[in-house]
Amino acid sequence: MESAAFFYGMEVFLNGLMTGVMYSLVALGFVLIFKASGIFNYAQGVMALFAALTLVGFQNGQIPFSHLINAIFGTDIHHFGWHMPAFLAILFALLVMIIFAILVEKLVLQHLVNQEPIILFMATIGLAYFMEGFGDLMWGSNVKKLDIGIPQGGNLWIEESTAFLGGEDFYGFYLDTLDIYATVIAIILVAGLVMFSQYTKTGRALRAVADDHQAALSVGISLRKIWVIVWCIAGFVALVAGIMWGSKSGVQFSLSLIALKALPVLILGGFTSIPGAIIGGLIIGVGEKMFEFLIGAPLLGGATENWFAYMLALVFLVFRPQGLFGEKIIERV
Amino acid sequence: MKFRNILLGAVAAATIAGPALADLTFPNLTYRTGAYAVNGIPYADGYGDYMTLLNERDGGIGGEKINYIECETQYNTEKGVECYENTKGLGSLVYQPMSTGITYQLIPKATADGIPILSMGYGRTSAANGNVFSHIFNYPANYWVGASAVVNHLLDINNGNIKGKKVALVYHNSAYGKEPIRTLEELAKKHGFELSLLPVDHPGQEQKSQWLQIRREKPDYVTMWGWGVMNPTAIQEAANIRFPMENFIGVWWSGSEGDVLPAGEAAHGYKALAMHNTGADFPIYADLKKYVFDAGKAAGDGSSAGTVLYNRGIYAAMLATEAARQAQSMTGKQIITPSDMRDAMEQFSIDEARMTAIGLPNFAPSFSVSCENHGGPGLAAIQQWDAKAQKWSLISDFIKTDSEVIGSLIAEDSAAYAKENKIAPQCS
Amino acid sequence: MLYREVGEFKPSYKKDQQTFPIRLDRYAFYAVLAFAFFVVPFLINDYWANAILLPFLIFGIAAIGLNILTGYCGQVSLGSGGFMAVGAYACYKLMTGFPDLNIIFCIMLSGGVTALVGVMFGLPSLRIKGFYLAVATLAAQFFLIWVFNKVAWFYNYSASGQITAPERTLFGMTVSGASATPEVAYVVCLSFLVVMALVARNLTRGSVGRKWMAIRDMDIAAEIIGVNPLMAKLTAFGVSSFYVGIAGALLFSVYLGAVEVGEVFGIQKSFLILFMIIIGGLGSIFGSLAGAAFLVLMPVVLKNVMVGQLGWAVDIAAHFEFLVVGALIIFFLIVEPHGFAMLWRIIKEKLRLWPFPH
């Protein structure tokens, strides 16, 4: 009996880790943009939604703006008729995100250079509204299924091979295959990003810009080019996050709300650290799932995850006000 | 400030529209965008298409054209109020807000303005007591009927004895999701089953903890009160933990194509409550095709025709227009007022013959409504999803529900409302 | 030429320190107040009250509250939705628990309760700063919503968890509940807004406001010169929550009449009020009102133009609404990053010299 409870606890712990990885995927985009340009990108969740919508649209051969065109011209067209293979659709979606990054830099960021962080934050809010309306107009607001071939469902192999632990009442560890894929992809992504920023010239330029804009300018690094690159990478990360979350629950408006789940991860890990986003995600994921398992469901009636994640982050902040891995804020009078 | 005043003046000129007295006005508070669009779109399509059909095929109701107005609320309470205020001056006959939150909002307002509300299978359940809620109707069924129907179905498939069984309720953590809890608790005491409650926070995209708990506790049956993205996520998670789908029963708002299609094959066998029959196999669809789809006047893009929520939109529109027709014959007038509409709704009755004449034979139960009972017959059926054929079908007749338990709960809740708001009994 | 300070001499310190030192400003202010109090109630109808004016007045109060905290004291807070919920539920419990208590007192007491709650949740601000504090106040937001959903005492054990405002009268006229006329509701909210805006203006111009602004600009330097950061921050949270709580109580009792906490006071409300003050102008009372007007009016105007006049389909109109609001926000930020308040200030500066260029 007791050992079953212990193994169930472990199962919740492992699932918490996986959920944390999913959160980190979203948080990564925030960290990248904040590091390089000091902007807290409220539009990251909407970017994930837009990227996922574009991917599905390309995959299913949807005609962009079909609803609008039908309304204006009275036609009745919806699909081109083809079905793109997943790999090609991902490439095209990436291309669209790159165009988006270039446009954002040209039309928004360029005009708001050197403004206060809260003004830049507000600009990303305007951007989020705009992308929301634009994405819905382009691809329609009904729910779409996202399927690029990643299998879902509890992993039978793990369940069966661990069922012997913990006695009769234990049914084996339940780990969703999709989550396992997401973890592997996240590890590859983070490793890639870390290697990119450490070992390539552009990566070094990115770190320089993150450190000090003016110093970077004075050694000849083009701030605008770096910002475009950063937004492209953030767009790619948003695409990956959108794919993972969209495969779980379909591509629709609520996908943009996953950004809210990434906020506690960011506070905990610090806004400026990539490993912080990962560790923060893991801590938040485990924390909220374990709390729900141990106290939330039995004693408080459930649905405690939302606020507990923030409370946990708050507790950490009291001891380390800049997050676990964030840069220590040095204030000079 | 001054610029704003000029702008306000311009807007005033734009919004003060004269009431269209020459038509019968039916507003529809829809949500085609926002978190619940997946369920809002097919319902709005069905409602709109039926209204268009009546206009095109019959020239309206009793010769009076229908003025159908759609107003987008995004499931947001304040926008719902704005839509209501915008359209009530146009002679709107009945409101169907399609949202429990907006319904609660409008209950006192519509009663004061004299416009009836039909909250078909949602909203405030105790509004079935016409003595307290004179202008609110929730026929043909409500949430407490739904909860009882689930339990009665479980009794059916277990030879009348579910003592000791474990039933879990996965519900949307809002007023809507909490509605069945009181009833299920009473029924649990009465029939001896164990009830466990698992709330899911809005929007319901993350349900891992709840389904892990279900996997651990292994309840015999799970029932769900979900809406929007919570439905497909729950069904996917249930499939993931390999919970037997035929033991998973959702309420009638968790049983549409949009909820089961994302899970694919794995959703096979999922059951849901039904207020009406499923599919596109009714004579009315031939008329819809001829007068609406082929004429290019469809409210949506046509892809939702035949789905459960589309049929529900048709059903809602049909109930509203039939009540208008009955009001016309009761008063002898062609143009009826909201107050005539309310009176007709209070004496509303519909039978199989009439529904067959409309083109919906064997679609829904016949029923009639009275002053004390604004909630209708209290019948619900069970439908099941066949993932291979990709269609829903009814697997039971319309089940009677436990009117004793439900009646006492309705009396208690409406008495509390009447006391808080000092309402005298309305039925003589 | 018209808008000038020439010839205005102030014979006393009191007159020198007026809120509106320029005569035209004063007259314009009185004219607007007279129009709002004496003309509008006769022109108002249900739609105007419930869709445009009441939301504007109520969110104006909330925006002033948040501006005090974020614009004047520099503590970014995303918990406004939760605090509005505290105000609403406090009002509900007071109205149902003490049926004879005048609604004005109920509302003010709810503001007081919210102030206490606000001070409690403001304690982390003593340690945490900037965006991190914002996300910490989100903890308050989600926790408060969960509490109101969960603890049945707050909604008087009703089966559904929704709260409905009972009918109350003021000077013989119904104020809350369904039979309240739009004029009465409008005048009540307007009175609250005018009184509270005046109080806020004077608070922020006085020593308390100066202490807040010192903390905002450079809190370490402020501490060195003797501003107590504990008192300053906590009073900012307290006063701000008082305003936000009153806005929530008015939203519940006078405007909506029934609320479901998750939907009405959710996170999107917190973000909405924050957007209002940023686009209106941080650190400005006029800015709070301008931002509230923009974000309340713009969607309604767009909807009425697109659906009412142009006859577009509702979902296309809804999408365009998002698009246009987003584009306008970005446009205004590029044109004037400090919000409408700064825009208005610059216009007034130019008007002072007009028709001369400099």
Image (spheres, coloured by chain):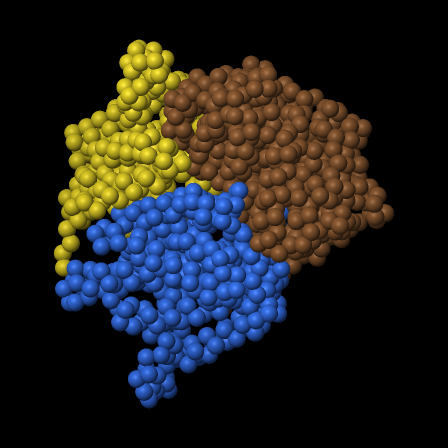
- Name the residue at 33% across, 56% down: C118
- Chain C: give its colour: blue
Residue B249 figure quarter: top right
Q: Which chain is yellow?
A: A
Most extreme residue toward the bottom, as rendered?
A: C11
- Decide if residue B35 is in sight here: yes
Vertical relation: C2 (above or below) C45 = below
Report whether residue B47 is seen.
no
As displayed, is residue B366 above or below residue A268?
Answer: above
Q: Tell me if residue B108 comes above or below residue B329 in the rendering.
A: below
Residue A310, image x, y percentages:
31, 42
In the displayed structure image, the side of residue C40 where residue C15 appears, left or right: left
Residue displayed at 41% across by 53% down: C86
Give B423 or B330, whichever is nearer the viewer.
B423
- Which residue appears at 30% of the width and 54% of the height? C120
Q: Is C111 displayed left or right of A190 in the figure?
A: right
Residue sitting nearer the eye, A119 or A14: A14
What color was chain B assigned in the picture?
brown
Q: Position of residue C199 (x, y in %)?
A: 38, 70
Q: Relative to residue C62, is residue B151 drawn left or right?
A: right
Q: Which residue is at 52% across, 25% downward? A: B192
Measured as percent of width and height from the top left, residue B215 is found at 40, 21
Q: Quadrant of residue A271?
A: top left
Residue pushed farthest right? B332
